[in-house]
Image: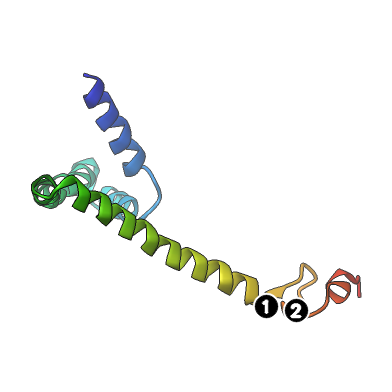
Amino acid sequence: MKVLALGVTLGLSAGISPGPLLALVLSGTLRGGLGVGLRVAAVPLLTDLPVIALSVTVLSALPDRAVAAGGLVGGLFLLWPACTTLWEARTAGGVRPSGRAWSSTSSARTRGSSG
C-alpha cells in the first residue's frame, strides 16, 4: 500500500507539472471532452511500460559495478553541460534594468554608475 501511494504521488506530480504532455492533455480535453483528455493522459502508461521493462531487464542483468560506473559516467556528463552553462552565463553580456546593454568585460565602476 505504501508503494502504491508513492507511485500515485509521483505520477500526479509528474502529470501536473507544466510541459508538453500537460499541454497535449489540456488541448485534447478542450477539443474532445474529458474522455479524450483521459485517454491522452493514459498514453504514457502504455508507451513507457516497454521502455521501463527493458531498462529493468538490462540493468538487472548487469553487475552492480557496471550500474555504479554508469551512474558515475552519467553524473560526470551532467557536470559538463552545467559547467558550460555557467561559463557562458559568466561571459555573456547582459541588459541593465535601465534597458542599456553592458558587457561582462566592463568595469564594476561603469556597471555601478547611475548614468
Tell me: residue 102, above or below residue 4. Answer: below
Q: Which mark is residue 28?
A: none
- The location of residue 109, given as percent across then percent down, is 89, 73
Mark 1 residue element = loop
* Residue at 63% in and 77% down: 92
Q: Earlier in the sequence, mark 1 or mark 2?
A: 1
> Where residue 106 appears, x then y in whole percent?
79, 80
At x 19%, y 45%, the residue is 64
Residue with the most extreme front position? 65
The picture places residue 54, in percent across and down from the top left corner, at: 9, 51
Q: Quadrant of the C terminus?
A: bottom right
Viewer-proximal residue among 20 and 10 = 10
Q: Are dots 1 and 2 in contact, CB under 8 Å?
A: yes
Q: Secondary structure at mark 2?
A: strand
Measuring from the top left, give residue 23's x and y in whole percent. 34, 54
Q: Quadrant of residue 5?
A: top left
Kind of residue at badge 2: Trp
Q: Residues within 10 Å of mark 1 (few under 14, many from 20)?
A: some
Q: How is the image coloured?
A: rainbow
As rendered, which of 65 and 67 lies closer to the eye?
65
Which quarter of the image is occupied by the N terminus?
top left
Residue under numbered circle 2: 102
User: Which residue in the structure is indicated by mark 1?
Assistant: 93
Residue 80 in the figure: left or right of residue 12: right
Give, as a three-letter code, the residue at label 1: Gly
Crowd class of label 2 (few under 14; some 14 to 19; many from 20; radius 10 Å): some
In the rendered image, the residue lying farthest to the top is 1
